[in-house]
Amino acid sequence: MRGRIVKGIGGFYYVKVVSDAEGPESETYECKAKGIFRKDNRKPLVGDEVIVDVLDREKRLGNVRELLPRHSELIRPAVANADQAVVIFSIVKPRPNFNLLDRFLIMMEQQGVDCIICFSKEDLDENGEGGKYRQIYENCGYRTLTISAKYKKGIRELRELLSGRITVAAGPSGVGKSSLINCLQSEIVMEIGEISTKIERGKHTTRHSELIDIGENTYILDTPGFSSLGLFELEKEQLAGYYHEFDSCEKFCKFGGCSHINEQNCGVKEALAKNLISEIRYENYRLLYEELDKVRYRGGRRN
Ligand SMILES: Nc1nc2c(ncn2[C@@H]2O[C@H](COP(=O)(O)OP(=O)(O)OP(=O)(O)O)[C@@H](O)[C@H]2O)c(=O)[nH]1
Ligand SMILES: [Zn+2]
């Protein structure tokens, strides 16, 4: 049978059946992956499409016989075949940590994955901050949304962006990622009009990445909440390349290889002074640049 790995814990892979001549689809088998390592020298990842030998149909036990080709492979978080990421930050409770957001955007771009930015808890946004935040990041070329899982606002729009894809969902703790995923799951249950079969997620905290089926060929990878992210394999000179709003003003920098920090006649700083570049973004750039500079100065670790 053919399936997709939805979770991996302690040497077991949980494989959801996507096609099976003899049994029902969408059942989950607990599998080992004996032999795969030797044969392919590859480690199965959540998201992998696999061929499974059924060992026990009753108990739903199997063995992963073959890994099918991947079209993408992320290291952080570890997932195969992801098409895009959605990063969630709440507008309030807690307020967004934009430095953390920028780190996440850089990390995903390094891995070649497009990001959608979702600002959550819109129902608590009394001062319209969400709109401002969206504007800042839209100006940098990102697709953004505001949503409320509580009042199911923005869910349809998000669902359209997710449809037919595998999307990594990430964000710090407490931003409402679980509530959002519940919302996306219960919607499909309502659409197909059957009794709720969704996993009751309740108050649990995500510790393992898990692929969750939220519709036809549509999956979301629930990842553990994070509170910090290091910058990896990045030289300070490369940083500006991830700040796409700098692209159009760099040509006005007097010095080639301008760092946009201390130089005179810097196009980026001029754009900042005219409010064409967001202060939040520029400040993050400056902080991250200093951080990368220190790492290199110390002859630092990069892994
Ligand atoms: N007002 C409001 N509260 C929300 C919304 N979404 C989630 N919350 C609340 O925010 C808190 C955190 O929500 P969760 O869905 O558990 O957040 P999480 O991001 O999954 O958090 P972790 O499990 O710690 O990673 C809960 O008290 C939710 O009730 C929303 O759209 N509006
Ligand atoms: Zn400059």
Image (cartoon, rainbow, N blue to C red):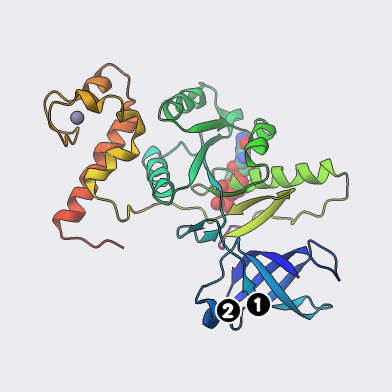
The amino acid type of the residue labelled 2 equals: Ile
Q: Secondary structure at mark 1?
A: strand
Can residue 149 be seen at all in this image of the molecule? no
Q: Position of residue 67 (x, y in %)?
A: 61, 70
Of helix, strand and loop, which mostly describes the magenta segment?
loop
Image quarter (top left, top right, bottom left or bottom right) of the N terminus: bottom right
Magenta range: 204-208
Calculate the distance from the C-alpha at mark 2 to the C-alpha at mark 1. 7 Å
Q: Report the side of 62 relative to 12 (left or right).
A: right
Q: Nearer the viewer, residue 294 or 140?
A: 140
- Image quarter hosting the C terminus: bottom left
Which corner quadrant of the image does residue 205 belong to? bottom right
Name the residue: 64% across, 57% down. 211
Query: How many residues crowd mark 1 within 10 Å: few (<14), some (14–19), many (20+)?
Result: some
The percent coordinates of residue 2 (x first, y second) are 73, 67
Magenta stretch: residue 81 in it? no
Q: Residues within 10 Å of mark 2 (few under 14, many from 20)?
A: some
- Quadrant assignment for ligand 2: top left
79, above or below 113, in the image:
below
Dot label at residue 36: 2
Residue drawn 28% across the image and 38% down it: 240
Q: Which mark is residue 65?
A: 1
Mark 2–mark 1 contact, CB under 8 Å?
Answer: yes
Q: Position of residue 130 (x, y in %)?
A: 51, 27
